């Protein structure tokens, strides 16, 4: 690749000569590099360096993907809801994370499956315990903006080992939940990007 990058366009014979190899020996390597998009080849011109255009375009596409284009509707519960009702809500909505809001509809906490499971062990009356007792509270909540890139959010999820983030915007009383972004949303976005490039 370096030979082609700095000397292209260059023929296969010239490349082989510089490597002190037979043309037939490097033919498979040139074919792989061309199919992978690192090199381009033109009849009677030779090989030239393409800079892997597809990969670069995909990388640029990933950076340009914003949360707001892929977020879904958040499943929100009030902080005074009972743990029992929250479990029912999670089951009915088929989600793994509930976002808890206060009476001003601002983000107060997050409830995961693990939080609800932990609270159900020990024989307590789940009808009498509000979710604000067991939820993860601010400032320990990881959240994002609709303007954040999906790559940034994916890194947050991996770093914090979580499955979903609330998408928030600043309101008069605090952070308002305007959406959610999940591992499924992100996976779907990257699959769509791959299909765009016929991968």
Image (cartoon, helix red, strand yellow):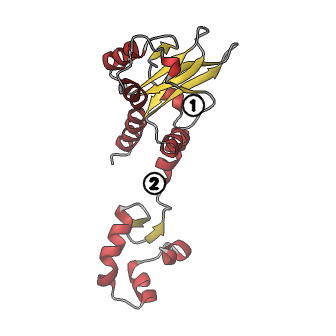
Q: How many marks?
A: 2
- Looking at the image, the residue that sits furthest to the front is 123
Q: Is residue 97 above or below residue 194?
A: above
Query: Where does residue 36 sit, x and y in percent of width and height?
Result: 37, 61
**Labels 2 and 1 touching (C-beta < 8 A):** no
Q: Which residue is drawn at 46% across and 76% down?
A: 10
Sequence order check: which comes first, mark 2 or mark 1?
2
Task: Return the residue nearer the eye: 24 or 155.
Answer: 155
Q: Name the residue under label 1.
A: 141
Q: In this view, does 137 lie above or below 44?
A: above
Task: Say what secondary structure mark 1 lies in.
Answer: loop
- Looking at the image, the residue that sits furthest to the bottom is 20
Query: Where does residue 187 sit, x and y in percent of width and height?
Result: 39, 39
Q: Name the residue under label 2.
A: 55
Compared across the picture, whether 170 is left or right of 13 comes to right
Query: Where does residue 54 sit, x and y in percent of width and height?
Result: 44, 53
- Looking at the image, the residue that sits furthest to the right is 172
Query: Where does residue 125 sit, x and y in percent of width and height?
Result: 38, 15
């Amino acid at each position: 690749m370096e030979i082609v990058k700095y000397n292209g366009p260059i023929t296969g014979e010239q490349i082989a000569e510089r490597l002190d190899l037979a043309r037939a020996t490097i033919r498979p390597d040139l074919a792989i590099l061309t199919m992978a998009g690192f090199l381009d080849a033109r009849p009677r011109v030779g090989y030239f360096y393409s800079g892997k255009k597809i990969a670069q375009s995909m990388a640029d596409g990933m950076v340009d993907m914003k949360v707001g284009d892929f977020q879904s509707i958040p499943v929100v519960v009030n902080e005074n809801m009972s743990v029992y009702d929250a479990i029912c809500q999670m089951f009915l909505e088929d989600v793994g994370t509930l976002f808890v809001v206060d009476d001003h509809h601002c983000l107060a906490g997050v409830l995961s499956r693990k939080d609800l499971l932990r609270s159900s062990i020990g024989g307590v009356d789940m009808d009498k315990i509000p979710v604000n007792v067991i939820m993860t509270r601010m400032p320990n909540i990881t959240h994002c903006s609709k303007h954040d890139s999906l790559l940034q959010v994916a890194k947050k999820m991996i770093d914090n080992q979580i499955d979903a983030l609330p998408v928030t915007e600043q309101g008069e009383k605090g952070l308002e939940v305007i959406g959610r972004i999940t591992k499924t949303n992100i996976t779907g976005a990257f699959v769509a990007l791959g299909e765009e490039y016929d991968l």
